[in-house]
Amino acid sequence: MKNTGIILLAAGNSSRMGSAKQLLSYQGKTFLERIIDTALEVFDKDQIILVLGANHHEISSTIKDKNILIAINEDWESGMASSIKSGLKTLSDHFPEMERCFISVCDQPYLTNDLFLKMSQLQDTSQKEIVVATYADTVGVPALFSKKYFKQLMELTGEQGAKKIIRQNMENVETFAFAKGAIDIDTPSDYDHLKTKA
């Protein structure tokens, strides 16, 4: 995907799960392996940045063979903003020709490479600078931002995620329906429910 990067956010400590949800297994792979492999189907390895924080030694040791960029956010406890900024800065340094960037997470089990491709195409056809997934009556990740918004992303603080920028710029936002995006895995019961459906 030309001039397009992706930030994979996986820095949290999974407090509601009680263990690192990045390493939970689903259909033969961990959640983290699944999203990395999905990203590698459409992005070059130099266009992908994985942001780790809590348990980063344990987690990074499981993906040594993936050969993608990893940023360690030592400030992960301050909230999602620090992880977005860490990922965007590192990726911009390694991939200076980047014109737009996805923000994604590792706990949406129904994410596919096709979703990234369609959202990218939608940005091209809609001429909008931001494309976001919609589910459960809200907007969320994956979200695709053009370079125009990189500065605003770098100015986020604390618990602020990219949703703040989306809401401030709705006139420049195109949405993509992703009903199964509402299914993310935060608790043991979420995980049990997912496994029973598999």
Image (cartoon, rainbow, N blue to C red):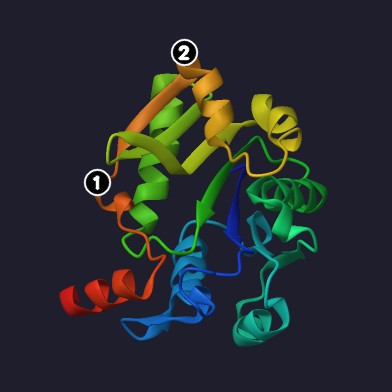
The C terminus, quarter of image: bottom left
Quarter residue 71 falls in = bottom right
Q: Amino acid at mark 2?
A: Glu
Report the residue marked by disc 1.
179
- Report the disc number at residue 99: none
Report the residue marked by disc 2.
171
Residue at horizontal 67 percent and vertical 51 percent from the top: 79
Query: Where is residue 132 drawn, in percent x and y?
Result: 43, 35
Alpha carbon separation for disc pair 2 and 1 = 22 Å
Residue at horizontal 51 percent and vertical 52 percent from the top: 104
Quick one: 97 or 25, which is closer to the camera?
A: 25
Q: Is residue 23 left or right of residue 115?
A: right
Query: Where is residue 20 drawn, in percent x and y?
Result: 54, 78
Q: Is residue 169 above or below residue 107?
A: above
Q: Amino acid at mark 1?
A: Ala
Quarter residue 101 falls in = top right
Quick check: can you spot residue 15? yes
Quick check: can you spot residue 1? no
Q: Is residue 48 left or right of residue 40?
A: right
Numbered disc 1: secondary structure: helix
Quick one: 117 or 173, which is closer to the camera?
A: 173
At label 1, counting other C-alpha atoms closer than 10 Å, the crowd grade (few under 14, some 14-19, many 20 or more) is few
Q: Earlier in the sequence, mark 2 or mark 1?
A: 2
Query: Where is residue 6 drawn, in percent x and y?
Result: 59, 51
